[in-house]
Every structure is written in structure tokens, then in C-alpha cells.
């Protein structure tokens, strides 16, 4: 009977050690999973941000190049203006009108660039908020997983305790019989 009790106690210790190891492993795996998902989301959003910034910069560079060429052309025309005849001056007036229209177009483009910049900033803010919300949700999910694992561990320990009590009762019955 003492040998049987010793075997049951050893069995109980082994079950408890296995339950603790399983609980620690499950918690570590859950935490690593949450961290990996957060890193993936952040990487994806950073890639989107870089892509949007590159597109905006390319568009702005192309527009600035066109405008610089127009300004250089206007400077050349103004330098030559003093040597032009009356007919050429009439053409110059027309060119100035077109240059004024180009300047107005530049102002419109500049406003569009500023609007794109504001929209990009708003999008960045929304992305930050989404990431924050997702991280909070993942943290809550991690906490819920941790609580679930704790409850499972407790239930497992209670079941183990019940098994141990049944074994003790069986030992008592065996001792009583002998």
C-alpha cells in the first residue's frame, strides 16, 4: 500500500510539472504570435507610407520641372524684349498673358500638392489610429488568451486534485481491506 501511495504521489508531481510547463509554453506561444502579427501590420503600413510618399514626390518633381522651364523661358523673353520691334512686342504681350495663365495653373497645382500633403497626413494619422486600435485589440486578445489558459490550468489542476482524492480514497479502501 505504501508503495502504491508513493507511486500515486510521484504521478501527481509529474502531472503538476507537465501542467506548469504546458501553461508556460502556451503563454509564450500566444505572446510571440501577437508580436509577430503587430510587426507584420507595422511593416505593411510603413511600406504603404513609403509608396505614397514616393508617388507624391515624383508628381511634385515633375510639376516643378515643368514650371522651372516655363520660368526660364519667361526670363529669356524678358531679356530680349528691349530689342524687339512693335510687332514682336505684341507677341510678347501675348506670351506674358500665357505666362500669367501658367502662373495661375502653377498656383492651382501648388494648392493640389498642399491638399495631397494634407490628405497624406490625415491618412498617416488614420493609419496610426488603426495600428493603435489593432495593438490594443491584440493586447486584449492576449490578455483573454492568458486568462483562458489560466482557467484551463485551474480546471486541469482541479481534475488532477479529484483524481488524487479518488486515489487516496482507493488507498484507504485497500488499507481497510487489508
Image: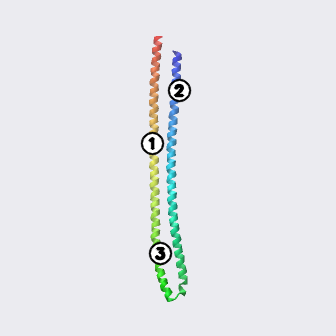
Mark 3 vs mark 2, foreground winner is 3
In space, the residues marked 3 and 1 are separated at their CA atoms by: 57 Å
Percent coordinates x, y for residue 66 in the rendering: 52, 72
Residue at the image point whose x is 48% and y is 84% from the top: 91
Percent coordinates x, y for residue 93 in the rendering: 47, 83
Percent coordinates x, y for residue 126 in the rendering: 44, 55
**Res. 14 mark:** 2
Number of residue marks: 3
User: First in sequence: mark 3 or mark 1?
Assistant: 3
Asked which secondary structure carries label 1, the reply is helix
User: First in sequence: mark 3 or mark 2?
Assistant: 2
Asked which secondary structure carries label 2, the reply is helix
Question: Closer to the camera, 143 or 57?
Answer: 57
Q: State the residue position of label 3.
A: 102
Q: State the residue position of label 1.
A: 141
Q: Is residue 85 above or below residue 8?
A: below
Amino acid at each position: 500500500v505504501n508503495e502504491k501511495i508513493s507511486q500515486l504521489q510521484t504521478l501527481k508531481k509529474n502531472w503538476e510539472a507537465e501542467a506548469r510547463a504546458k501553461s508556460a509554453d502556451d503563454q509564450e506561444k500566444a505572446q510571440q504570435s501577437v508580436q509577430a502579427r503587430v510587426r507584420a501590420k507595422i511593416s505593411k503600413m510603413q511600406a504603404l507610407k513609403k509608396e505614397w510618399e514616393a508617388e507624391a514626390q515624383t508628381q511634385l518633381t515633375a510639376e516643378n520641372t515643368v514650371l522651372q522651364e516655363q520660368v526660364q523661358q519667361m526670363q529669356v523673353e524678358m531679356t530680349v524684349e528691349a530689342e524687339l520691334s512693335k510687332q514682336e512686342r505684341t507677341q510678347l504681350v501675348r506670351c506674358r498673358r500665357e505666362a500669367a495663365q501658367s502662373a495661375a495653373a502653377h498656383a492651382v497645382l501648388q494648392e493640389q500638392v498642399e491638399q495631397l500633403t494634407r490628405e497624406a497626413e490625415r491618412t498617416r494619422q488614420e493609419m496610426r489610429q488603426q495600428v493603435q486600435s489593432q495593438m490594443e485589440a491584440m493586447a486584449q486578445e492576449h490578455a483573454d488568451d492568458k486568462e483562458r489558459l489560466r482557467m484551463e490550468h485551474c480546471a486541469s489542476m482541479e481534475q488532477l486534485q479529484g483524481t488524487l482524492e479518488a486515489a487516496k480514497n482507493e488507498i484507504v479502501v485497500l488499507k481497510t481491506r487489508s
